[in-house]
Amino acid sequence: MELFKKILIILFWLLLAGSMVFLMGFIDSKNGELKVSSIEITIQRSTDVVLITEEDVMNIIGNDENRLIGRPYEEICLEELENRLRGNGYVADVNIHSRIQGDLYIDLTQRTPLARVINSNHEPFYLSTDGHTMALHSSVIMPSILATGLIPDSLDPAVTLRTLDYIPENERNRLSALEMIYNLALSIQKDKFLSAQIEQVYINEKGEVEMIPKVGDHLILFGDLEHMEGKFNKLTAFYKEGIRYSGWDVYDTVNLKYRNQIVCTK
C-alpha cells in the first residue's frame, strides 16, 4: 500500500512537470505569433523640467514611422531597445515589457539636473542628481547652481560620481573637481535656505572651493570638503544672525576654512 502511494505521488509530479513543459511551449508559440498592437510610454520626472519626451523615446527605439507596430515580438529584442534608451544621457532607468494583448509598455525615469558646469575648456554640461554628466538641453534652461573654474573633467556619460557617504573623511581633500561640485550641490539643494543664497561654485587654482552668493558682493572661501556640514552650518548662522546687523555689502570675503570660527574681511 505504501509503495502504491509513492508510485501515485511520482506519477502526479511527472504529469505536473509534463503539463508545465507543454504549457510553457504553448505560451512561447503564442508569444512568437504575438504582434505589437500599441506602445505606451510612461516617463517619471522629479521636477517639471522636461529633457526627454515621448516623441524622443519613439525616435530612439526606431518607431518614428510606426515601424514596430504590427511586428511580431519574436523579431524584437526588448533588451536592445532598453540599451538604446539607456544610451541617452537624460535616461536614468528604463524597463520595457509586453502584455498578452500585444501592448508594449515603456517605463522610463528621467535624470534631474543638479548643477550646470563650465569646465576649463569652456565646455558646458550638467551634473545630475544621481551623479552623471549630461549634455545641456537645446530648449531647456534649468535653474541650477553654476560651477566654474579649474575643472579639467569633460562630458562623459560613463562617469559615476561618489557621495561623501562612500568616501572616508581623510580622503575628502583629494576629490576630483566634479566630485567636489557634486557633493556641494547636493548639500545646497537639500537646504532651502542655502539654495536661495548660493548662486555659483568656483574651483580655484589650489583646488579649493569659493562660492558666490545671490545677494551681496562678498566672496565665500569654503576650502576643501572636510567638515563640509559644519561649514554650511556656520554660513547659515552668519547669514541669519550676523549679516542682518552689519549689512550685505560690508565684507569682501567670508572665510569658513577655520574650525569653529568665521573670518570676515572688509
Image (tube, grey):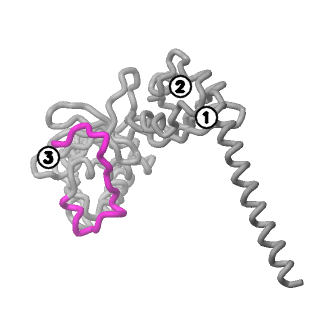
**Rendered residue at 44%/50% (across/down):** 190
The residues tagged by marks 2 and 1 sit, at their Cα atoms, a distance apart of 12 Å
Dividing the picture into quadrants, the one containing residue 9 is bottom right
Q: Is residue 237 left or right of residue 82?
A: left
Viewer-side label of 2, 1: 1
Q: Which mark is residue 204?
A: 3
Say what secondary structure mark 3 lies in: loop
Name the kind of residue labelled 2 in the image.
Answer: Glu
Q: Is residue 214 visible?
A: no
Dividing the picture into quadrants, the one containing residue 99 is top right
Which residue bears the numbered disc 2?
54
Nearer the N terminus, badge 2 or badge 1?
Answer: 2
Name the kind of residue labelled 1 in the image.
Answer: Tyr
Could you say where residue 219 lies in the image, as x and y percent from the top left? 21, 45
**Rendered residue at 50%/40% (across/down):** 94
Which residue bears the numbered disc 1?
105
**Rendered residue at 30%/64% (across/down):** 167
Name the outermost residue toward the left.
205
Q: Could you say which is closer to the camera, residue 26 or residue 109?
A: 26
Give yes or no for residue 172 being in the magenta stretch. yes
Could you say where residue 148 lies in the image, as x and y percent from the top left? 21, 38
| Chain part drawn in magenta | 151-174
Give yes or no for residue 165 being in the magenta stretch. yes
Q: Is residue 39 above or below residue 155?
A: above
